[in-house]
Amino acid sequence: MEPGASPMDWKGVRVYMTLKDVTTSGPAFDGYMAQVPEAARSMMHALATFEVTEVRPVVDMGQGWERSV
């Protein structure tokens, strides 16, 4: 989100998602953890996968999300 001079000038989007899966072990979790810097691994406890179901402007006046970024 990027603030503007007035609420109508703000840029950004709202993203609506549905949770598809949560895993704490297994190949997907291990593969992801291999990409995370070692210093951050102790903070990671689960891998959550989401599906984006809708993208809308922050201020929705029918302009379409493409014109909000």
Image (cartoon, rainbow, N blue to C red):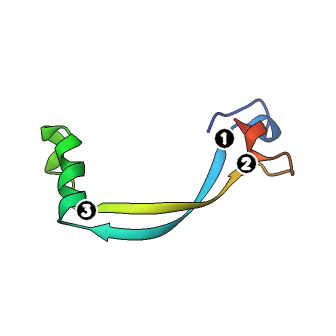
- Judge left or right: residue 19 versus residue 31: right
Badge 2 crowding class, 10 Å Cα cut-off, few under 14, some 14 to 19, many 20 or more, is many
The reply to whether discs 1 and 3 touch (Cβ–Cβ < 8 Å) is no
Q: Quadrant of residue 35?
A: top left
Sequence-wise, the earlier of marks 2 and 1 is: 1
Q: Which mark is residue 57?
A: 2
Q: Quadrant of residue 3?
A: top right
Q: Secondary structure beneath disc 2?
A: strand
Residue at position x 13%, y 51% in the image: 42
- Residue 34, disc: none
Q: CA distance from mark 1 to mark 3?
A: 28 Å
Q: Badge 3 is on which residue? A: 46
Q: Amino acid at mark 3?
A: Ala
Location of the N terminus by quadrant is top right
Dot 3 or dot 2: first in sequence order is: 3
- Residue sitting at 43 percent across and 70 percent down? 20
Q: CA distance from mark 3 to mark 2?
A: 30 Å
Q: Nearer the viewer, residue 8 or 51?
A: 51
Position of 13 relative to 30 (above/below): above
Q: Amino acid at mark 1?
A: Gly
Residue drawn 46% across and 62% down? 50
x, y (%) of residue 13? 66, 46
Q: Secondary structure at mark 3?
A: loop
The residue at which mark 1 appears reads as 12
Q: Is residue 66 above or below residue 45?
A: above
Q: Secondary structure at mark 1?
A: loop
